[in-house]
Image (tube, coloured by chain):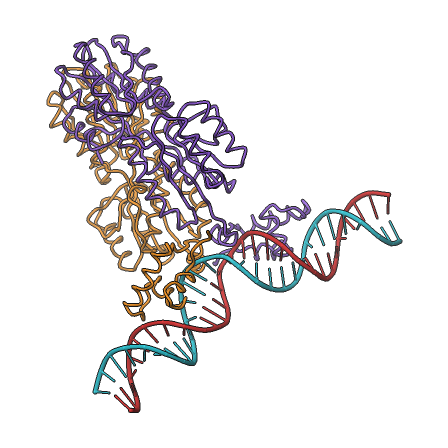
Chain colours: A purple, B orange, C red, D cyan
Amino acid sequence: MSRVTAQDVAEEAGVSLATVDRVLNKRKGVRSETIKKVATAMNRLNFVRDQTAANLARSRSYRFTFIVSAGETSFFSDIQSEIEAAKFEAAKERIDIQMLTVPPLDPQAIVEVIERLGDDIGDGLALVAVESQAVRDSVNALRARGVRVVTFISDIPNSQRQRFVGIDNVAAGRVAGSLLKRFISAPSGDVAVVAGSSTLRDHVERRMGFEQVMRTECRHLNVLPWIEGEEMAGVVEEKLSKLIAGNPNIVGLYSLGGGTRGVIGAIDSAEQKISMVTTELSQHTRAALISGTVDAVLVQDPSHEVRSAIRVLRALVDEAPINEKQERIRIEIFMRDNLP
Amino acid sequence: MSRVTAQDVAEEAGVSLATVDRVLNKRKGVRSETIKKVATAMNRLNFVRDQTAANLARSRSYRFTFIVSAGETSFFSDIQSEIEAAKFEAAKERIDIQMLTVPPLDPQAIVEVIERLGDDIGDGLALVAVESQAVRDSVNALRARGVRVVTFISDIPNSQRQRFVGIDNVAAGRVAGSLLKRFISAPSGDVAVVAGSSTLRDHVERRMGFEQVMRTECRHLNVLPWIEGEEMAGVVEEKLSKLIAGNPNIVGLYSLGGGTRGVIGAIDSAEQKISMVTTELSQHTRAALISGTVDAVLVQDPSHEVRSAIRVLRALVDEAPINEKQERIRIEIFMRDNLP
DNA sequence: CATATTTTGACGTACGTCAATCATTTTTGA
DNA sequence: TCAAAAATGATTGACGTACGTCAAAATATG
């Protein structure tokens, strides 16, 4: 029971190997009647084209670029080390990956990096996007040049990017909301929200989801205007400490990304009991989860996201189908009891 | 900037291609000094052996068997369709998969299937295990014959199986416990637990985790003896209805697997408000989540588990390293707000 | 120093598909 | 019906590694 080869199909269909190959690779010069003959033969024999052999013969190789924020956030340093790790795995399959970092929240820097790269960007780009017309234009220009583009972690929906690799951020916000709703036992009070920047769509969307829940299901809670920390723990801690000091009514807090270390610092030195949901699993959030400062952490798996981005880019180049189930990035909820 | 081949390494090291090949495949007959020379040459040139070409040359193919329960549970029918789906993907990489189903909770049936298969079981087996000495012996016998074995969904730790592919069930139980703790607003009351069978280790472990939390953190709640439904919705519904009718104190329920449909039926017709955490995402739990009957559902992704089992078996055959991050099966928590 | 043993080289074939070339057959249209 | 065009066959050489054989060289052993 050895494998069925293209040669077997040719014999079964009563045509030559060359013709089967033409059909297989959708090259022209084959009558539709013959195509049909070959197709039925393939079905009859249950032929599955050998990807490994095909790739080898094509000697196709891929070159992908990752552009990620170089923030002080532990999340992005995780992302970076995951990309580094994925490099080795990818190399075995002829995928060459380069990673470039840009200052966080700086659309201009992204545009410049893309321009500087020129054709060196390769076949595809995975980009941690920042909401900005310049970036959008840049992405569209790349697409026009035939480069495949996926946004990564943070999306730019109204651009030509072919796919977004990341979690459903609105859903993440909603989950945070309904968890916090359960965690807060006080009959009423204020809820603080800490975010990185309003130019990061993932943050905006989480905020959106969070507010949806708060507005519809938590009339007893009052959501305060968000604190923008620009991804810097120091800034966050300062602003938040001030807010808490001036507001004894705060009973809950949602830290939706960036500077969580600062959030924890501020909360730890606060008087009142504040229920808390945060993002990113770092040593700080982990410790805070165990100590009880933080009640739940909503996480996206950087390792999965990096692998997914690579697989998706590759599928786009090959014009192959994407396995939706495999590429669905999950919102993971960590509580004290299921820390990995 | 073309790829570095083994030939290039040979030239760089000043040896022949044959020698490089011997080093590459760890064949004997090479002085350690020469091995070192080749190794440094590989580093210098940054040589990565081409997996596709290697697999092709080896023309290695794999044959794996899945043995899964044929229960009426929607979870296992999901598993089965995922295995079917994975078949096609796997075939492209020369992996031939066969799936066999056995009646649920029947260790003898598993043993018989394994014996009947004989060598036809192939290179590896993924088995939804049932706690039983006979099954354990059977697994050990397979291992002795050189068959790779992973347990799947439900483990048998004290056997020779090489790995368990599934979630951390104790953690899942703990998460269920701490969620339920938050969901129950009553100052005290009873908590019911519904499970499939005490011969399923995953169920036992979840129960264990759940009780850990209940005992240590919820002194105000009293956990009732579990209801064993043998994976049948009808049985569950009947037993549970009776329990609820006779006990108006029930404020919470953890359905940890098997017959969730029956659980929902019983709860829907109950008088009191019962907070509820269940397992498996089926149309029933989904609807119950939306309607508010169920507060949270803890899920394992069958699609991921099937792919993972295949990758792990393959890595075991190849004696290749396993990517732990990729193979970590997550406990997913679904609430009304993040239903996929 | 001769012989045995180990190490290395040289070479060829295989894996299944891709892709190109050139020859030949079939189809099409005027 | 004949030439032009289209379709198909036949063949061949990649692609990069695996793996076997045989011979030659280097090294060890007595």
- B34 displayed left or right of A251: right
Specify whether B121 is left or right of A316.
left
Tell me if I can see residue B266 in this picture. Answer: no
* Image coords of residue B178 (percent x, y): 19, 26
Q: Residue at x 36, y 23 (%)?
A: A200
- Which residue is at the front of the view, A185 or C22? C22
- Nearer to me, A133 or C22: A133
Query: Does residue B215 appear to the left or right of B19 in the view shown?
Result: left
Quarter occupied by residue B140 = bottom left
Q: Residue at x 51, y 50 (%)?
A: A48
Q: Nearer the viewer, residue A30 or B160?
A: A30
Indicate the position of residue B278 as horizontal and vertical percent values. Answer: 27, 27
Give the vertical position of B170 relative to D26 (above or below). above
Instruction: Tally the marks.
Output: 0
Is D18 displayed left or right of B36 in the figure? right
The residue positioned 49% from the left and 56% from the top of the image is A3
Q: Is residue B88 visible?
A: yes
The percent position of residue A145, horizontal first and vertical second, equals 54, 35
Give the image location of residue B82, x and y in percent. 40, 39
**Residue B224 sits in quarter:** top left
